[in-house]
Image (cartoon, rainbow, N blue to C red):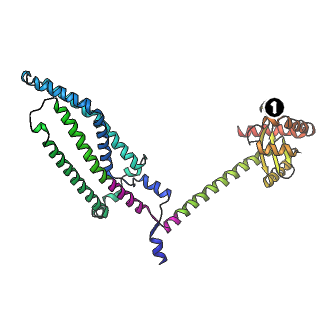
Amino acid sequence: MADQDQDQKTEQPTGKKLHEAQERGQFARAPELMVVFGLAAAFAVVSMTAPSAAASVAEYASGTFSQLHVVEFGAGEMPAPLARGLRVLGIVLIPVLAATVVASLLAGGLQSGFQLTPKALQFGFGRLNPVAGFGRIWSQRSLVHAGVDFLKMVAIGFTLYLGARTLLRDPLFQAPVEAAYLGTFIQESVVTLLARLLLALGCIAALSYAYEKYKNHREMMMTRQEVKDEHKQSEGDGRVKGMMRRFARRLIQKQMLAAVPLADVVVTNPTHYAVALKYERGVDSAPIVLAKGDNRFARRIKELAAQHGVPMVENRPVARMLFAAGKVGESIPPELFQAVAGILAFVYQTHRLYFHDLRVRRAAASAATA
């Protein structure tokens, strides 16, 4: 019974799983939304440009029909009315086409969260599996898509039927009208047809996207075992990062301890802090922090300093400030210049033999590194 509970997808998908699914292109999407967005964009553009477009069409129709008897047709030449008609058609249709393309891209971006899905473009041999392909064809989702496609056919057919019935009742088909009326007829017909299509397909697209959203969420659900495995994996990553941080810290400590024998002085607080400083005239603009540590590492610094005869000066406030504000490999803070200068002057006077040997050791170390 417990095994059955573990196999059931009862847990909400984690952020990691959702992100990986997004990269694979596995998210709720409905092609009908792109159609609806395109129709909405076309409807908006046509509504805004309809008066000017209708005037252009009416002017073209009036001018063409009134001068049709004088138009000359030559072999290999495009008649002037036809050329003007193409220009008028371009002026009317180009804004609509541009708006629909932008709206379709926007619909795709909204469904994908405006995120790239590179893994969705990768080739996989699993897609060539005929058994899996047959299963997809006869799956519940494919049946739902077939039903949605059928609804779209019915909606479009019914809309066109209503539109055709309305158009045939227009005075244009019942009695003689002025040529200028053609623009008004086209304007009203296109706006009415787009509005009906938008309403019908909008309802179908909403139902289709709601189903896709629900289905995708159900597929993303996780079993308790999957959640546990992912949690263990993330903990493992945390342990690896912790090991890397500890390794880096040990490496830095090793470098600091190697620099202690070349220090001018170690400032201590006698048990808690120890800071090793170096200052070479003509080389350093200010004293440099070679190493610093507290508690156990401070004791190691002092032990190493004692082995190499490095002068140690106990100054509790300076040691605490150097440990808190000083950075290894950088100059001490300016506010400590005066205090450290006094400490260096003291050790220079009391440990002259050490500094004579120190110059020799530093020269040897520089030659070895060169």
Residue shown at the point (34%, 39%) measured from the top left: 102
- State the SS at label 1: loop
Whether residue 335 is situated above or below residue 241 in the rendered picture: above
Decide if residue 117 is in sight here. no
Q: Position of residue 237 (x, y in %)?
A: 57, 58
Residue that numbered label 1 is attached to: 281
Magenta span: chief secondary structure? helix
Task: Report the residue that reaches farthest toward the bottom.
Answer: 1
Can you tell which quarter of the image residue 260 is in? top right
Whether residue 17 is situated above or below residue 261 in the rendered picture: below
Please tell me how many numbered marks the rendered image carries: 1
**Magenta stretch in the rendered image:** 206-229
196 or 223, nearer to the observer:
196
Residue shown at the point (43%, 52%) measured from the top left: 23
Task: Report the residue that reaches farthest toward the left.
Answer: 69
Q: Residues within 10 Å of mark 1 (few under 14, many from 20)?
A: few
Residue shown at the point (76%, 40%) measured from the top left: 365
User: What kind of residue is marked 1?
Assistant: Arg
Q: Position of residue 275 (x, y in %)?
A: 81, 45
Is 103 in the magenta? no
Q: Position of residue 7 (x, y in %)?
A: 45, 71
112 or 340, nearer to the observer:
112
Left or right, residue 253 beside residue 336:
left
76 or 132, nearer to the observer:
76
